[in-house]
Amino acid sequence: MTQLPPRPADDSERALGFARATMTRWLSPSLLFATAVRVGISAVLGSYADKREEMAALPAAPPADLSDGTEPPGYAEAPDGGELWFDYVSDLGDGFDATYAMASLLATPSLDLAGTTTPRGRMLVMGGDQCYPTPSITGYENKLIGPYRAALPRTCPDPAGAPRLFVLPGNHDWYDGLTAFMRVFCQGSSIGGWRTEQTRSYFAVQLPHRWWLLGIDIQFDSYIDDPQRRYFIEIAAQMRPGDAVILCSAKPSWLSAADGDAEAYAVLDYFERTIIRKVGAQVRVSLTGDRHHYARYSECARDSERARYTEVGGAAQKFTAGGGGAYLSATHRLPQRLVLPPAASRAPGKSDPPAHYELASSTFPDAQTSRRLAAGIVGLPAFAPGLIALLGGVHLLLALAIGGAGGTTGRGAVGRLDAIAAGLRHAGVPGLFEGLVNSVPGLALSLGVMGAGVALTKAGRTARGGVAGVAHGLTQLVLAVAVIAGAVAVASPLPGTWLLAGVLPLVVAVGGLAATEVLAAYLWLADRIAGLNTNELFAAQGIADYKNFLRLRIGPDGQLTIYPVGVRAVPKRWRFAPDAAAGAPWFTPIDRPLEAFLIESPITITRAAPDQPPDCLGPPGAREGA
């Protein structure tokens, strides 16, 4: 019999077996560089060494069977006659406070949600991005396994008695080609009190009353590899006409399609059309994360402006629920309507006519709160202090390049410094601007600043993105000249080369701080005016609050009910409890209670879709904040 580890005696890293991580600082220069390298490696691995192809050598696990509604052997609760509860959480492996808070709620035996007692799920689905910013065995241990083990310690030596865990990889899990993901989640191990069963990065679960849950790995929306396609064809062969599918993927491709990537939805459309609908089944619910908020889109009839429909027995639903622990994403830029697949898609055989979806009124956070939180970017220097040093260094190089362009070339290092000091002292503001283009270093740095401004928009190839990027780059250059001119004026009493001793530190400190605030202002204005860089605007702040997960129930009547669970504020201080019972959480909150609530009323979905989707809500933009 497996020996269970003892409860830790103290909260040191050595005793806990993991480090309590802080939130990822997404605009940290070192992190940006390291992540860029991993992204490049991942792109190569995805093209030339796709781990999904290698998985074909592993035996494919048959679909987990939870269809009879009875508890698995050794499970503590009694059979419930065809009722099944399970949970969905995504984007969870980041700072300890948010990740552990959500793990604690998922581990709690039951939650009272608006007067309804909802038991902990017999199955937990993790929807992607289990480790930020890049995956490793140590990263998974510190940011996922450790917090979940602390929230639900394993108390039963027999893993058959534990609730089941199924995990999809997101793009951050893919950054090492799924190497760490496969070792952590595909070898029958335990994550705290949950046990893994899958052998590949995708899975299938047979649920009660002819419901199915399918988790597909489509790796950056690129394609479905042939072994995975054949696996799901075999699963679909077990379905009957009229069966209903809950489809999990790691990215809301429907939003990417609305953002201008016409082919983003093509893979999901292909999967649904050629595998699910081909056997007479229907995708009734789509679940995903990647965007770290809660939002729901409901299928509706085309070109109708009648009243809102009832949620009971409604048409297909698409949920984004990426609130498991990562930084908060905005909701105020979500499109009001979706047409899937979009008319611009050139995918052969795409679904025709397309389906129309409407954004539900209850997002979390709501649009007004999302806009208010956006203004917090003013604290960017505190969120990413490394930017001050980086941008201050750019100002330093600009000062040296400008001074060198305006001074007479001297001999030796001292002579060159004398020339730079003289160039800065006598340039004047017009001369400082001339120095940006009158030397090769100045021109190269200026073009680099402009190029970085355009690249930051991630839409530089469009007119809107190009204008925004050029405007930001020019503003940074004007700021640099202003800071250099001010520093020269302050240090002008210093003689000769000593001028640099006064100018250069001021340029680095003041210029770095001012440039960081200009970047913050750009991010806010780009989102506010042009809808650009909204993700960067929120990622830079690392907001740990406004978290969410989904609790799902298939009732004895065969209806699926989804409870969207939200947490407005995450505790930031925890008390270690070494003397609590063996199965009790290791930490309890000190500064505030961990309070869960229903984001919106439970959404009930029948297995059979209605003949006609419900009516849409009216013309686009009808919802406040759209």
Image (cartoon, grey):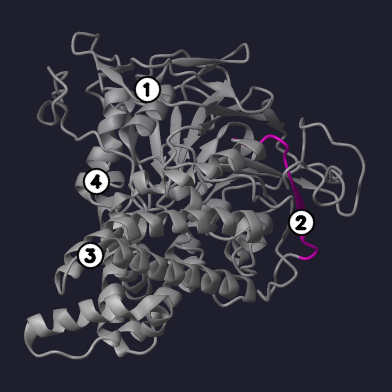
- Dot 2 or dot 3, earlier in sequence: 2
Name the residue nearer the viewer: 623 or 107. 623
Q: Does the magenta stretch include residue 57?
A: no
Q: Quadrant of residue 355?
A: bottom right
> Cα distance, mark 2 to mark 3?
72 Å
Q: Does the magenta stretch include residue 357?
A: yes
Which of the pair 528/44 is nearer the observer? 528
Residue 316 vertical placement versus 416 (above, below): above
Q: Name the residue under label 1.
A: 73
Q: Are marks 4 and 2 in contact (CB under 8 Å)?
A: no
Could you tell which of marks 1 and 2 lies nearer the N-terminus?
A: 1
Q: Name the residue under label 4.
A: 139
Identity of the residue drawn at 65% across and 74% down: 347
343 lies above or below 620: below
Which quadrant of the view contains residue 40?
Answer: bottom left
Under circle 4, the secondary element is helix
Circle 2 is placed at which residue position? 355
Q: Give the range drawn in magenta.
A: 352-364
Q: Where is residue 388 in the image (x, y as percent from the top left)?
A: 31, 56
**x, y percentage for residue 562?**
62, 30
Which of discs 4 and 1 lies nearer the camera? The answer is 4
Q: Is residue 464 left or right of residue 421?
A: right
Q: Is the magenta stretch mostly helix, strand or loop?
A: loop
